[in-house]
Amino acid sequence: MEVLLGQVRGRLEVGDRRVREFLAEFGRRLLRPALARRHPELGSLGFFLRPSELARTIEGMAGEHVRVPRGLIFHIPPANVDTVFVYSWALSALMGNRNVVRLSPRSGAVAEAIVETLQEALREADPVVGQTQRIISYEREAEAVTAALSAACDLRVVWGGDRTVQDVRRYPLPPHARDLVFPDRSSFAVIRAAAWLCAPRAARVSVAEGFVNDTYWFDQAACSSPRTVFWVGAEVDCDAARADFIDHVSRVITARGWGVDAAMAVEKRVSTYGLAADGVAQSVEFRGNALANVTLAAADQAPRRWLGAGTFAHARLGSPAELAGLVERRDQTMTHYGFGRPELEELARALAGRGVDRMVPVGSALSFHRVWDGVDLPAEFTRLVTVVR
C-alpha cells in the first residue's frame, strides 16, 4: 500500500484543463459504434462526459469562495452496476482530486470494456492525469488494503448497499476525513393511465423502450431501476392502460432478444409466489421467463426488495398525492409519464424529504446527474476557501 499511495501523486486544480481533455476523449471513445453496439449502456456514460456537460459542471461551481480539491478520494463502487464507478470517479477527477478506485473482481464485461477504453485514453493524456489516478482490484477479504486506503484518504465514497456501508465503516478514517455513502435504495414508476391511453402508438412504443432500458440493462439491480409501477386514475382506465403497457414492454423485450437463465426464472417464481402466499399479491402473470407482473392487493404493500430481473409489481392510485403516504426514505428515483412540472413540484414539496431524490421521465432512470441521491457530488469533492480582502 505504501508503494501505491506513493505513486498517486501530482497536482491538479478544480476543472483542470488536462483532466477535461482526457475525460472528453475517454467519452468519445466510449461512443465508438463498435463498443456502443456491444454495450449500449455506455452511451449514457459517453454523453455524460461530453465537453459541454463537463463545462456546465465547472460553471456551476462558481461562487464567492475559492474551490480547491478535497485531496485523496477512495471509491468503493458496487459490483452489480458496472458504470457507477466512472461517474463518481470522473466528477472527483474533474474537481482536481487524486483518486483510488477499488473495482470488485466480480465486475463484468462492461467494467472490463471501460477499463480498456480508459487505458487507451490515458496513453494520450497529459502524464499528470495518469499519475493522480489509480484503479485497483482486490477481494473484500483483503482487510489490510481497505484499512490502509481508508487511513490515508480525505474522503471515502461507498456504494453498494447497507451491508457494504456497515462493513466499510469498520475501518477508521483520519479525523479530518468523512464518508459519502450510497446505501440500499429502491425506485418506482408512476404513469397516468388516461395519458397513456390517449398517447399515439409511437409515443407508447418509445415509453416502453425507455422503461425496458431503465430496468433490463443492469438486470433491474440498479438502485434507480423501477420495481413497482403505480397507475394513477380510475380503475377501468388503469386496468386498460396497464394491460396495453405490459403488451408493449413484452414486444420490446422479445424484439431485443432479452431473456433470463433458468436459475433467474426460478428466483422470480419463488419471489412472486411468496408474495401471493403472504397475501401481498392479488395475481401473478408471466410472459415467458423474461417478464413477470404482480398485481398488488394494496398500494401500500409495494415491495422494496429485488424480486428478480424483469419482475414488476403494479398498483393503482387515485391521485399522485397518495404517494405522500406511501414513500419511504429509501425510495430514490420516481420515473414518470403523463404529469406536468407543476404537479411534480407540488408532489416533491408534499414529500418534504421523506423520500424520492429524483423525478425523471420514464427512460431516464439510469441517466446520471451531478446531483445524485440528493447530494451535489462536485461540491462534496471540493473544499471551500474563504478569501477576504
Image (tube, rainbow, N blue to C red):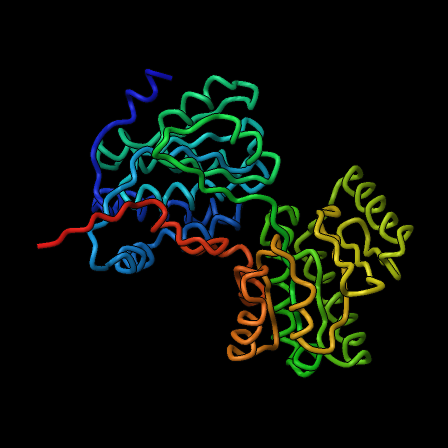
Q: How many numbered dots are placed on residues in this image?
A: 0
Q: Residue 380: image x %, image y %?
A: 36, 47
Residue 183: % across, % down? 57, 43
Quadrant for the C terminus, please: bottom left
In which quarter of the view is residue 61 placed? bottom left
165 vs 57: above or below: above
Image vertical order of residue 159 relative to residue 190, above or below = above
What residue do we see at 23% from left, 59% from top? Answer: 63
Residue 5 in the image: state x and y as whole percent.
32, 22
In the displayed structure image, the side of residue 106 where residue 374 appears, left or right: left
Quadrant of residue 313 within the rendered picture: bottom right
Front residue (pair 129, 143)? 143
Above-or-below relation of 14 to 188: above
Outermost right residue? 277
Outermost residue, left direction? 389
Q: Is residue 190 left or right of residue 172?
A: right
Viewer-proximal residue among 219 and 381? 381
Q: Quadrant of the N terminus?
A: top left
Q: Which residue occupies 88% across, 49% down?
A: 273
Please give the name of the residue rendered at 65% of the width and 46% of the height, measured from the top-left corner: 219
Residue 176 placement (x, y as % from top left): 34, 34
Q: Is 375 in front, or is 264?
A: 375
On screen, residue 306 versus residue 112, left or right, reads right
